[in-house]
């Protein structure tokens, strides 16, 4: 297995774990693992991949799987951002109401 293959497969495994963390609302572990995943992906240089490793079709298949996982992650993160924004808005409205009544 070439190093590029290992990096892509590791990123896929990490992405699957990130999905679980996001679904469980475990954003601390999510952030820690995402940092590790990004570090690994920065090492990926497909142009220098071992020619005896994967074919272009195999590499494309792995990358498609990784991209699909990234799209799922993006969707979950955007949903959580919206949830946090809504909670913050409620908190601010409650704080303003409390402030108005305490005068």
Image: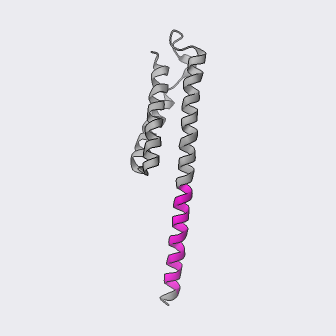
Q: Residue 52 appears at what percent x and percent y?
A: 51, 9
Give the residue drawn at x 57%, y 51%.
78
Q: Is 7 placed above or below 55 here?
A: below
Residue lying furthest bottom: 103
Q: Is residue 89 magenta?
A: yes
Q: Residue 70 appears at what percent x and percent y?
A: 55, 38
Image quadrant in which the N terminus is located: top left
Task: Give the extent of the magenta segment.
Answer: 81-100
Q: In this image, 19 relative to 61: left or right? A: left
Residue lying furthest top: 52
In this picture the colour scheme is one colour
Q: Residue 17 appears at what percent x and percent y?
A: 43, 38
Give the residue drawn at x 54%, y 36%.
69
Q: Is 90 placed above or below 39 here?
A: below
Give the residue drawn at x 53%, y 48%.
76
Q: Is 86 placed above or below 94 here?
A: above
Q: Nearer the viewer, residue 5 or 44?
A: 5
Give the residue drawn at x 50%, y 88%.
101
Q: Residue 50 appears at what percent x and percent y?
A: 51, 13
Q: Is residue 80 magenta?
A: no
Q: In this image, 54 relative to 27: left or right? A: right
Q: Quadrant of residue 13?
A: top left
């Amino acid at each position: 297995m070439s190093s590029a293959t290992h990096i892509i497969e590791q990123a896929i495994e990490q992405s699957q774990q990130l999905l679980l963390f996001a679904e469980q609302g475990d954003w601390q572990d999510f952030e820690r693992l995402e940092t590790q995943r990004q570090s690994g992906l920065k090492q990926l240089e497909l142009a220098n991949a071992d020619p005896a490793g994967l074919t272009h079709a195999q590499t494309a298949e792995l990358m498609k799987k990784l991209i699909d996982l990234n799209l799922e992650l993006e969707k979950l993160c955007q949903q959580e951002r919206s949830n946090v924004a809504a909670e913050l808005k409620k908190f601010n409205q409650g704080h303003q109401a409390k402030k108005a009544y305490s005068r």
